[in-house]
Image (cartoon, helix red, strand yellow):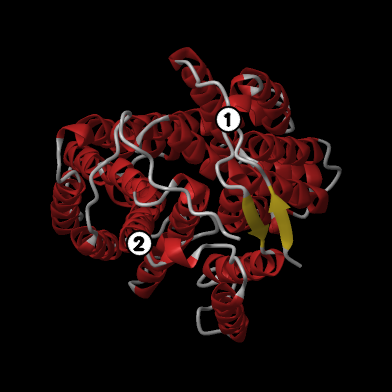
Amino acid sequence: MDQAIDKPVIAAAPLTESEKNVIIAGILLSMLLAALDQTIVAPAMPTIGRSLGHADYLPWIVTGYLLTATAMAPLYGKISDVYGRRPTVYTAILIFLAGSLVSALAPNMFVLVIGRAIQGAGGGGLFALAQIVIGDLVPPRERARYAAWISGTWAVASIAGPLLGGGFAEHLHWSLIFWINIPLGLVAMAIINKPLRKLPVTAKRHRIDALGALLLVVATALLLLALNWGGSAYPWASREILGLLACSAVFWFAFALRLMRAAEPLISLEVLSNPIVLAGTASMFLLQAANIGLSVYLPVYLQSIIGLSVSQSGLAMLGLLLGTVAGATFSGRTIPRFFHYKHIAMVGVLFAIVCLGVLSLVAGRASLLVVELLTICIGLGSGTTFPVATVSVQNAVDRAHLGVATGVLTFLRSLGSALGVAMLGAVALGYGLPLAGEGVPAAGQIVSATPFMMIFLAAAITLVLALITLALMPEKSLRGRDEAEAPVVLVE
């Protein structure tokens, strides 16, 4: 049932620069919590399985979080446009902390999976809301440099998460993985409490389309289940996977009909029809599919072909990670200096494509040094796209639709991650890569470099598609601090 909300435009005292920095620090701390919980659990999973039993359900600790985090992202964008950023941020943090509490106290695997799903329902909102709040605080011309802060937050989570998870599980207790979220979340809420009150609610009438939200969540959940189970739990051509895909398609079709017929759809047709939003979100979807898929199978390559241990391959992955952060930082600082700012991302993606092509060609005989240099360059090139896509999408819409547009961007970025892992996994299996339970070839098996050559080539082709979408994306001059905001569209 639709819920109508009437809100007056609230005039608030302007935020000082120190207050803006406090809000950004608090919101990034909140985002760090959600990002950590995507990386901190994996090293502790064997310990959790021994402690709680039912180890065959361990993958659901990751899948449960992924399902709800991805499905909820666009909902938070719309809700924050209606009720304001502060209550929405607080709600997301509290849901995340509730999930952390359930997970920490879980007496069995079933309760832990439920706790992780609750965590994801809050964590998915924190990813989107971090970018939305920064969009509220900073004009588009200056916004790009903050994208590097977001990339840095992901970098910290990617490095610290596995170290903390392994350390807690081995030396203390696995439940500390979840208990640590409670004090950090409360600190984040305390930091942003007062200054976040000054963020205005710009639109005075909106509707929450509950039916549209339900259709979107179900369609996304079914699709992600198919992508996660396909090729691992069930063959891609099995009736289980085909059934999930068919059901997902039905719900996506119903969601599309709802978008066309609802008085105010969950995702505005004005936003969806914007060519900048379409191209920007599509490029992010494709880029993330290549990046995350590569980050999953690169450690397998390093262990199987280069001969590194598990811990050594984890350290070797820092090249790709730090290269991505450096690329995003460079792009964010450079965007304000260019009128045709999308060319920064286009050159970066082209550079990454060339490096992936070279890696594919030399995969069977490359030294560790060559692989490290190439992966750093791949990260540098692909990292330039994150600020460009985010700023382009946010600059293309007015403030009343900022939350929805950013939510769609975050949603497709997460969906691209799942699709990329499934796509490259299908390539690996198609070329006979013998995978054990954790995605690593079983001990004693001799692995050819051919599957990895094709994986790198598939990632390069995906980036070619991302480059094409960037080339087709129109450019709009970035609004500066002193320029008028685009008019707010009120839906009556």
Query: Could you tell me which quadrant the C terminus lies in?
Result: bottom right
For marks 1 and 2, the one nearer the N-term is 1
Amino acid marked by disc 2: Ala
The residue to which callout 1 is attached is 11
Whether residue 419 sits left or right of residue 164 in the image: it is left
Amino acid marked by disc 1: Ala
Residue at 49% x, 51% y: name it: 401
The residue to which callout 2 is attached is 282
Is the residue 388 above or below the residue 454 in the image? above
**Residue 287 in the image, given as x and y percentages of width and height:** 32, 55
Residue at 19% x, 36% y: name it: 369
Between 189 and 78, the one lying in front of the other is 78
**Residue 406 in the image, given as x and y percentages of width and height:** 46, 49
Name the secondary structure under disc 1. loop
Bin the neighbour count of mark 2 within 10 Å (Cα to Cα): few under 14, some 14-19, many 20 and up: many
**Residue 329 in the image, given as x and y percentages of width and height:** 28, 31
